[in-house]
Image (spheres, grey):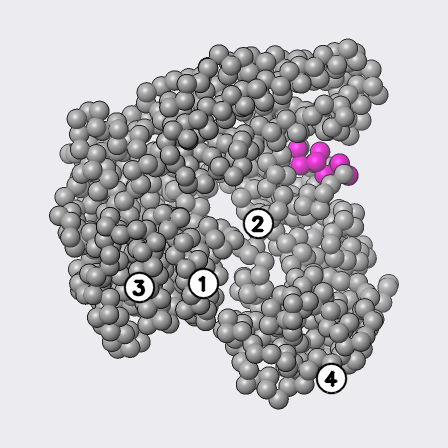
Amino acid sequence: MMESPKYAIVDLETTGHHPANGDRMIQIAIVIMKDWCIEKTFTSFIHPGKPIPLFIQDLTSITDDDVRDALPFEAHADYIYELLEGSVFVAHNADFDLSFLQAEFKRAGLSQWHGKVIDTVELAKIVFPTALGYKLGDLAYELGIQHTKAHRADADAKATAELLKICWDELLRFPLPTLQQLHKRSFRLRSNLAQLFFEALQLKRSKVEHYEDYVFYHQLAMRKLHVGGEDSYPVVNYPATRTEKIEKLKETVPNFEERPRQFQMMDFVWDSLNDKQERVIEASTGIGKTLSYLLPAFYYARKSTCKVGISTYTSHLMDQLLQEEIPRLERITGKSVKIALLKGMNHYVDVVRFSQQYMMQDDSYDETLIILQVLVWLTKTETGDLDEINVSGGGQLFLNKIRKNENSTLLQSDFDYYERALRKAKYADILLTNHAMLLADLMRPTPIFEQIGGWIIDEAHQFVQAAITQDEKLFSFKNWKYLFGQIGVYTDEAQFYKLQRLALKTHRVPMQVMQQLEKLFMQMLAKFDQVMHNLTHLLMQQLKRSNKHDMKTTVFLEQLAIDRQQFEQFSTIVQRWLDAAEEVGKQFEKSVDELAPEHVFILDEWRFWIREYKLAIVQWDDVFLRSNTEYSTWIEVDRRSIPSSLQLLKKPIQVTSTIERLFSAYREKIGIIWTSGTMTVPHNAHFITDQLGIAHDVPLEVLQAPATYFSGAKAFVVTDMPDIQTVSQSEYIEAVAHAVTRTVKTTDGRCFVLFTSQQMLRETVELIQDSGLLDEYMVFAQGVTPGSRMRLLKAFQKFNQSVLFGTNSFWEGVDVPGDGLASVIVVRLPFSSPDEPTFKARANYLQAQGRNSFTELSLPEAVLRFKQGFGRLIRSSQDKGVLIVLDRRIETKSYGHEFIHALPPISVQKLPLRDMVLALEDWYNNER
């Protein structure tokens, strides 16, 4: 047995990321680990020879006072170098720590350190492919690693050492074939994980392996799953009375407090399911909406022996149901709940396609990493849902290649996760799905949601958006160019090159047939370029006429005098190429058993790209060739990159008839409950239900939490903000920036600033940053700071002094419980832009019917968003927070009171900015 290596786990804290620009170390910690035990630790503050930036002090809690008496790096350099000698260098994001340390060694006059490196970020991505995040703090939280002082080198180094040990222990749990595959593929990784995998492999080979928990598809180890059957359970009785509900909840819910509205909603849901009636329930924050429908749904499923379907819009809520709410339901009822999650077919892995991809050797780094992640994930997943895997870089492109589709090879259910999901759903108490999956039942030859005893549609106000998205068509210039690049001609060495090489090797397809196929492909390219040139020319002419100067702009397709015949000609050429490409594939497929596995893979890839072209040309025909007054089609383009930024979208103007058609099969046969935190707006209770096609005689219940729930909330309207219609946008932005900085300084950050325009957000953030007034705060801005919405939110929550600037998607579905959020600033009332294509089409549709688009669409939509914006602030009865409105229209316009009425019963003060800041300061100091 080879000697166990010594690991030096290193973490640095620095003044910045660039030593060449003068950034310096402020703390270093090294943990020496041998035989998986800590032998030695070293930690020290380092004097950087310069002040520590304020945001670094906030991040690390290391101040200038902490390093005042510390020695410079040069004083420690020799000892640090000695500690690293003969060790494997380990760090979380090793590229940063090692490169920074090498630069410091060079500055201290030492030679470059040489040795093996392990990056625990890369290692954790492979070993824990479904982790929510790979930052050290995220992993520590998920794996139970004690990490009380994040961004302090000593705490981070110890946490990284523990992470390394946990990864090692996890490796030893993998089946031997999986470890062999990991080792075989690991030589293309960026850090020296091959050595670690080899050590684990050696240890595993010395022990006897049993594989009762796995099934094997060739060499792929997959977790065995017991789907279950039609087990009989004793009937359980619904707690119908107040006393019975209290007894149920009191025993299992910590700090239980009776919520009369919650009990009321439970009974509404129970009655609707039993009476097979439809009902709409608006349940505000504080009601306990999720448990209010889960409890009666479970009892009804057991009583009726029919499963209840629950449909949500966001993955966030679905995850919350699975990970938090269902376990809570089981604790309350004392029963095991049979739960099934069902998504669309392409969410699930196709094991055959992955096996083929694995056999190929010419992988990029991104492909190698995701292949290793999938290998490990297969040993753990019970669902086969590819959304479970946390991918980065080009990993998503690889996942798209291994998704199940209608052409996937039929397998027995042990290896087919979609079939597993369907079987599990058959015997479930509660079936979880999403709005898109439910809507897709309209398009399926055989619907899969027929055996349902009741539907609960949560996030019901988003069902309209889901229906629009389900029916939208898209053309993207970049996507088509990407498709062309995947096939290519012979000299491109892409898919056609591989197929022609196979033809030469196997003599199954004559060369003249391959040459004719290539000729058709070149005709397709030429026609596409011609059509796009003409379309771009028409677009530029229209932009000149419209006097639009925004870099990113939209133009309705009907405004362009396009020649549809050209688009038909391109469609015809694509179809001719597809016919020829399929015929070539069929000629290769004769006696496919005689082909080598790598040749079968080439053919499978060819079929995959043919399918992608078929999907793309259907979208092309829908967008350009099928004119329909019930749809709106527009072009989105960035002037700085024409034609590469060209996109066409075609969306339905209204989807009421689609939703009615879907639920006509269920109405009066089973109970249907539509619920959300926002189902109504003042003076227009049926704004959402009309769009959903729900009749006015369907009961609509509005359940509001008691006023005491919102006792920690307050609202201010700033009365001396300029009127944007009488001043320039730059003047208005200056006033917004001034109000925001005053507010942020008063509340010590912890502030959301909500905009309706990305351009105004960007200009406000730039002005604030140029002024330096918030330099001591961490500023995160949607569309400016890199990262997704959830990534920005996580970053915002990590800092005490932080501000988050957001647009549309931050108005709802974002939770910052506790004292993480002190204020929400509404820069402008959230009316849709009159030029936004979807809104404009819907407004024109109403006006054509002689209806008022402002009162029937624009105003209720804005009030609904405003209501949701306030919902970001108070997420529990202990929360404290202030809503600040900078838009004077809430006071000066006749419709302003609609927004005030949409708020819960809280104090609303109308004050000039100076007085508002004083009142805010007084309120904030008293509430802390």
Mark 4 lies on residue: 75
> SS of the residue at dot 1?
helix
Give me the residue at 80% from left, 58% from top.
195
Vertically, is 715 above or below 401? below
Q: Position of residue 739 (x, y in %)?
A: 31, 64
Q: Is residue 627 left or right of residue 244?
A: right
- Mark 1 is surrounded, within 10 Å at the Cα level, by few (under 14), some (14 to 19) or many (20 or more) other residues, namely few
The disc at residue 390 is: 2
Q: Nearer the viewer, mark 4 or mark 2?
A: 4
State whether residue 455 appears in this view: no
Do the residues under discs 1 and 4 have CB atoms within 8 angstroms? Answer: no
Give me the residue at 19% from left, 61% from top.
719
| Amino acid type, label 2 | Asn
Taking the magenta stretch, the answer to whether it contains residue 519 is no
Give me the residue at 70% from left, 36% from top.
357
Label 1 to label 3, Cα distance in Å? 16 Å
Mark 3 lies on residue: 739
| Amino acid type, label 3 | Ala
